Amino acid sequence: MTRPELSRRGLLRLGALLGGSAALAACGGPTISESGGAAQADIDWSGVQPAPQITWWSNHPGTSIELEKEYIRRFQEQNPGITVNLVTAGKNYDEVAQRFQAAAGTDNTPDLVGASDVWWFRYMINGQIIPLEGLAQHLQIDTADFNRTLYDDYAFNGRHWALPYARSTPLFYYNRDVWQRAGLPDRAPETWDEFEQWAPALAQAVGRPPLGLGPGTSWTAWWFCNFMWGRGGAYSQEWTLTLDKPETLDAGEYLRSMVNDKKFAAVSVGGDDGYVADFSAGVTACTMASTGSLRGILAQAQFEVGTGFLPKGPAGPGCPTGGTGMAIASAKSPEQQLAAGMFLKFLTDAEQTANFSAGTGYMPVRTSAIDRPDMQAVFAKTPQARTAVDQLATTRVQDWARAFVPSGDQYLTTAIERIMLQNENPATAFSAAAAEIKTSYEQNVARYI
């Protein structure tokens, strides 16, 4: 699915629909530079020579630091004139992005940087990254071989601003041993109604709410898309906020009740990855976790792990794509950008993406990688790895309020966690989020498009 093109007129609709502005909260995301925009003249790459050294900022998604070091070794073996310096720029996508924002205008900008689903648009609007069409054509990167949904997640006004790298969807993970003790069929529930039918037996088997839910920015508002889209709701319809839509409020109420009234789900503690640790330790019977958590879960769990599609709601399936792509910094010289492009081409080719998928559980981002013998061998040995690839057919592009508005994800996460943890009325929580998203849009987007 191609992301719709945006115009200044379309963007300004949100301000008109939402009313006046207010001060942006101090805890909000980075502001946009006064230069605004991200337009950059196309470069004639034919006369450019690659720089001898580049820097790559990564958070090593899926505990992939050793894999990333290996890809650098392989690349440098084929390109001995280029050295790639790998920097651990944060423990997650948000930390990498915040460091990249802070480095703007300094000599500490990387050549290649992670661009997650809720950060790449900020990079683009701030003029920090380059469009990749010209460079991809010069380097003969086969962009048609990328999974179209994953590639077009980085599209804006006919240009692409990153290439897919560590891409994922949430999966439903379940403890097959607990399922057996509870007398349930060996599969994920097809619907949330079916899960509710199974929940009492599961709760008895584990002695607590069976479903572990994870908190945290870049996570909570992502998996909630499943509840919300499955009930016909949405964060926004293009630039029109729909947090007061009955179906959206119904999704919030469904989640509130599941946690606080029915006790079928509980929010895991222990940091951003506490829900993964709880499931891997057998504390919870099931969870929703990223495909990128698959290898870690399989390595830690002392039980048989099952995976399935996210359960459907009354309105059908609802599954977002997520994870990170890789973008090239605009502050660097054409020579550095060319070298970064050469490494990015290598990093996202079929061989590397198949290897990365096998080693982490993230989806192979190239369609040709799926049919490679090494990828087929992974599916045969670890059928759980196939689930995300199959589920990709049910995914959809994320709502703009989360993906395009700076700190939109943070404000939505806060609202959802208030609903879960404080038993708050969804209408109250989402109303507060709407006000904050409106302010962020007006101050950080509308003025610069």
Image (spheres, grey):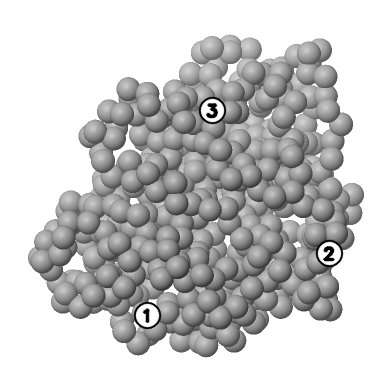
Pointer 1 residue: 259
Disc 1 residue crowd, few under 14, some 14–19, many 20+, Cα 10 Å: many
**Side of 278 where 163 appears, left or right:** right
Q: Where is residue 310 in the image (x, y as percent from the top left)?
A: 37, 59
Which residue is painted at 26% across and 59% down in the image?
A: 188
Pointer 3 residue: 145
From this viewpoint, which residue is outermost toward the right?
35
SS of the residue under disc 3: helix
| Picture quarter with the C terminus | bottom right
Q: Is residue 136 visible?
A: yes
Q: How many labels does the image show?
A: 3
- Does label 2 or label 1 sit earlier along the sequence? 2
Q: Position of residue 247 (x, y in %)?
A: 53, 76
Pointer 2 residue: 12
**Side of 313 where 424 appears, left or right:** right
* 402 vs 354: above or below: below
* 122 vs 12: above or below: above
Disc 3 residue crowd, few under 14, some 14–19, many 20+, Cα 10 Å: some
Q: Position of residue 227 (x, y in %)?
A: 45, 69
SS of the residue under disc 2: helix
| Picture quarter with the N terminus | top right
* 415 vs 144: above or below: below
